[in-house]
Image (tube, grey):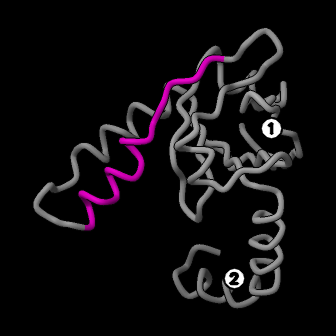
Amino acid sequence: MLIGEYKHNLDPKKRLSIPSKFRKELGEDAVLTRGLDNCLFVFPSQSWKPFAEMLAGLSMAKKDTRSFSRLFLSGAVEVEFDSLGRILIPDVLKEYAHLNKSVVVAGLFNRLEIWDETRWNKYKGDLEKNSDSIAEKLGELGII
């Protein structure tokens, strides 16, 4: 299970060390792609395939589904961990997520998210301020 929040630095060669706890769950390789809210998603390879198949199965006739598929699939890259547990962040993904030196790697059960630390702190602060109203909406849906 991928849970927790860790701060790491992106090195000058755009390599990011993935916490060992997460590497054990991810296996030998993973898929890195654009995420939502200008973060990056990291999927274990075995979880990526069904997700990508679901995206590929969306209707090409609808603009929104084409766009959603393009967001995730066109930016996806397979990544392997080097001997120090680092992955390389391609320029296009680094720019998409506005990554600077300090980043946060957050576990969200079946995937990781990689955030620029400043953007993460702002996002998380806003989320925490609105947690009561979010909980009410989820309660109305019968989720909690």
Taking the spot 67% from the left edge, 48% from the top edge, the residue there is: 113
Q: Nearer the viewer, mark 2 or mark 1?
A: 1
Q: Which residues are magenta?
A: 64-80
Q: For the residue carrying disc 1, how many other residues have a C-alpha within 10 Å: few (<14), some (14-19), or many (20+)?
A: many
Q: In the figure, 14 relative to 51: above or below?
A: above
Within the magenta stretch, is there residue 127?
no
**In front: 140, or 77?**
77
Separation of residues labelled 2 and 1 (CA atoms) = 34 Å
Q: How many marks are shown on the rendered structure?
A: 2
Label 2 close to label 1 by CB (< 8 Å):
no
Name the image quarter holding the N terminus: top right
Residue 10 is marked as 1
Q: Position of residue 47 (x, y in %)?
A: 50, 33
Relative to 122, 51 lies left or right? left
Q: Callout 2, which amino acid? A: Ala
The mark that comes first in sequence, 2 or 1, is: 1
Q: Quarter of the image for the C terminus: give it.
A: bottom right
Which residue in the rendered view is the most extreme toward the left? 61
Q: Position of residue 139 (x, y in %)?
A: 62, 83
Badge 2: residue crowd in 10 Å (few <14, some 14–19, many ≥20): few
- At 73% from the left edge and 13% from the top edge, which residue is drawn? 82
Q: Name the mark on residue 135.
A: 2
Above-or-below relation of 55 to 98: above
Please identify the residue farthest to the top as the structure is shown.
Answer: 83
Q: Secondary structure at mark 2?
A: helix
Residue 85 versus residue 141 in the image, above or below = above
